[in-house]
Image (cartoon, grey):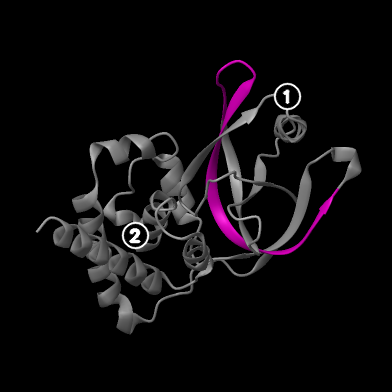
Amino acid sequence: REQLAAAALSLAHLPPAIVHALPIVVADGGWLFPCTFLQLTVEKEGAWVSQILARRAKGDNRLGIIGDPEGHSGILSTIVGVQDAEIGWLHLRLRGDVRMYINGTWADPAMGPLHFVNGTLFTDAPLPAAESAELQELHTRVRRLFFAQDTDAKAALRSVVQLPPPEEDAGPEAFSFYVLQSLTLEIPKAKTLRLFESTDTLGRLRALDGYFTDAIARHESEHR
């Protein structure tokens, strides 16, 4: 939770910046968002894994993650933990830091199958003061709707890769990404990518509000 809070504080509408030669991998079926965590289970002897661990041993814990290999964006993440899993496998614990537009990728034959990326970092745009009341109202409502439809079974599945939901005072941006990550198997990939790339916190919460409102209406209609 302390790491999550630190990540949220680091997202104070950073100016555009470029990252160069960042190792990048596709999170097979998984999405990583700012202020959230993801656990990847990877083969210990995999060629790119050994290269990542070698970089980590030298103090470089940065790793780019792509949730959709056809997309044009990814996220700069930090490896915050490595743990042995069953024989021959490792759990990589990743914290999502800042999203990035992908400017170019390439492979280095000396690094085996590991690919690298240059990217432009981006965060949500500052919100006009006139919209702050609506943002707070939506934040409160989406939290209520999220927990209203939540179940112990869903929470147990999320706990494998996610921390508990951020507290309300962590802010709407952090919570919107937490909810979006939890819904990646339910929301169409194209819509997930669109919301991932959006810099509009208010628009993202409006979309999530609409999703939960429609889901509840469908549930009530089916059980009449």
**Which x, y percent locates residue 28?**
59, 43
Task: Provide the secondary structure element on which disc 2 rests.
Answer: loop
Left or right: 7, with 84 as reference point = left
Q: Quadrant of the C terminus?
A: bottom left
Secondary structure found at label 1? loop
Q: Is residue 32 left or right of residue 211?
A: right
How many numbered markers are drawn?
A: 2
Residue 99 image-quadrant placement: bottom right
Instruction: Look at the image and tell me whether residue 19 can be seen.
Output: no
- Is-magenta flag for residue 84? yes
- Indicate which disc residue 168 carries: none
Q: Earlier in the sequence, mark 2 or mark 1?
A: 1
Q: Residue at x 36, y 54 (%)?
A: 179
Q: Check disc 1 and report the residue beneath it.
A: 45
User: Which stretch appears magenta?
Assistant: 82-107
Residue 63, x across and y down, in percent: 66, 45
Q: Is residue 102 magenta?
A: yes
Alpha-carbon neighbours of circle 2 within 10 Å: few (<14), some, or many (≥20)?
Answer: some
Name which residue lies at 32% across and 80% down: 131
Amino acid type of the residue that numbered disc 2 sits on in the rendered structure: Gly
- Rendered image quadrant of residue 213: bottom left
Quadrant of the image containing the N terminus: top left
- Residue 205's x, y, as percent? 34, 67
Checking the image for residue 171, the label placed there is 2
